[in-house]
Image (cartoon, rainbow, N blue to C red):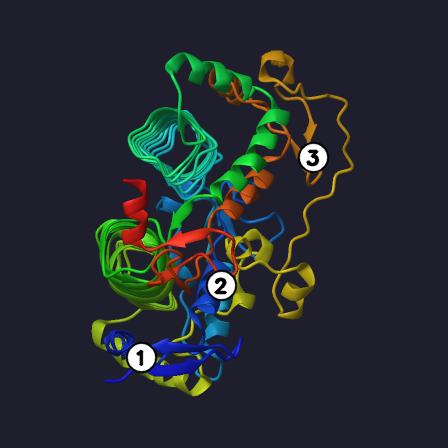
Amino acid sequence: MPELTQTCRITGKEFVVTEWEQDFLQKFGLPLPTLCIEERHRRRLSHRNERKIYNAKCDLTGEPIVSLYSPGGPCTVYSQDAWWSDKWDAKDYGCDYDFSKPFFQQFHELRQVVPRLSLMNSQGENSEYCNMSLSNKNCYLVFGGDYSEDCMYSIFCMYCKDNVDVYWVNESELVYDSTDCTKCYNLKYCQNSHNCKDSSFLFECRNCDDCFGCVGLRSKRYHIFNKLYSKEDYERKVKGYRLDSWTAVEKMKKEFAEFKLKYPHKFASTVNCEGCTGDYLSNANNVSNSFGIEGPAEDMKDVFLGGWVAKDILSSDHVGHKPELFYEMTGSVDGYHNALSACSWWSNDVFYCDLVSNGHDLFGCVCLNRGEYCILNKQYSKDEYFDLRARIVEHMKSTGEWGEFCPMKDSLFAYNETVAQDYFPMTKSEALSQGLKWLDEEVREMQSDYVIPDSINDVSDDIVGKPLVCEKTGRPYKIIPRELELYKKMGVPIPHYAPETRNALRLAMRNPIISFDRSCAKCAAKVVTSYAPERREIVYCDKCYLETVY
């Protein structure tokens, strides 16, 4: 079976469908994709809201809740306790399939009426303002983080304590304003570093203690800008950089960004991988064009963020914890032979479903727990289910819907509320021209007479709760007590930007979830990398990079 070349029907970009992909799709009875992978990612991510949360009321109990859905939106929303209770039944909303209408129209209508889960925040303690999270304690505005304590303003921090403003930092403590770090302690302003402690401004370092402004070091101590100092000189010079000062830290961020360009960058951040392409991959085998994969993981392609015992996954995002045979899935865990669905948990043989759990053989179902042989939330016998399912598939083939993920225009969120805006941004006019929703940020004419001291050493407790205004966007924000306590403990200045602004700056530090062909700057070997060819970084292949850092 030879490779095939398809043309994206949106961008006109040509893309290759490999023999493995063709065989994979045959297992689902699905046609070849009509969209390039970037547009497939965009479409799925336009249905995922992680961080935009609102104060609302439960439509079942009337109690105050924190909700993913903006007030006045098209959905009925229940609190977490109410949604998981036996006080309602999703099958009560079941309906007959209408062959005179497109499937997506019927599915969208069902999604608007079945009560939605307000947040995906399970088993949290004093962590009401978290989402996509599990078993957090005393956390605030943590999204996608699990088993963490006393963490704030962070995304995907797992098994962490006392972290603030981090993205994809795991098994770490006292880490501030950093990305992609593991098993670290007392780090500030670091990226792609592991098993490091008591350091600031590190990039791609391993097993380093007491280092400052360093790139690509291995098992070093008392280094400043990659130069060795005595303990006494190190401590004196680092103190002179005034990391307690906002002005000094912002100046150092610019200097370090230029310093990093002097040293080679590994073409991809991979650990214990074989036959893999993409970035941020560990313990993976035969995983291609994928990003943010934590193994064990094997036989995956075009996946963004997933793993943890994953196998045979194609064109999906945010999937993990024992998934197998997933295609065009988002936000889903632990299942087998599932496709074209969002938030399918512990379920098998699920197609075109949204927020289903502990079920099997479901098609077009919404917010259904422990269901089987259901279509559009209506119960059928096993034989009736497979007969009707086959007829619906033929109908969807005739309408051109079969094999396509739900349209972006059917998202229950505004485009700028979703993760799609992080990785594939649009302007308001671009979104509206495509028939997508857009939610204008509430404009509050606000001025603050509170002047944030430049040094954390000059900040008093009266800053807590004071109205502050982001210097970049004008967004209002405030400092909470535990946050101030951590800033003082770590000796870092009060941020002058609102949390969402800080998050955008962190995301901008990471490479895109796109692969490029490039040559090693040392040996000219061909590499597949997330560094675009026109970028200034010196990019080395794995062999040349290892020869440089060891």
The three-letter code of the residue at mark 3 reads Glu
Asked if labels 1 and 3 touch by Cβ distance under 8 angstroms, the answer is no
Left or right: where 492 falls relative to 289: right
Per the rendering, the mark at residue 42 is 2
Classify mark 3: residues with Cα within 10 Å, few (<14), some (14-19) or many (20+). few
Per the rendering, the mark at residue 471 is 3
Q: Residue at x 52, y 60 (%)?
A: 534
Closer to viewer: mark 2 or mark 1: 2
Per the rendering, the mark at residue 388 is 1
Q: Residue at x 64, y 26 (%)?
A: 247
Q: CA distance from mark 2 to mark 3?
A: 30 Å
Closer to viewer: mark 2 or mark 3: 3
The three-letter code of the residue at mark 2 reads Arg
**Can the viewer see residue 71 in this picture?**
yes
Q: Position of residue 280 (x, y in %)?
A: 35, 50
Q: Position of residue 229 (x, y in %)?
A: 40, 20
Dot 3 or dot 1: first in sequence order is: 1
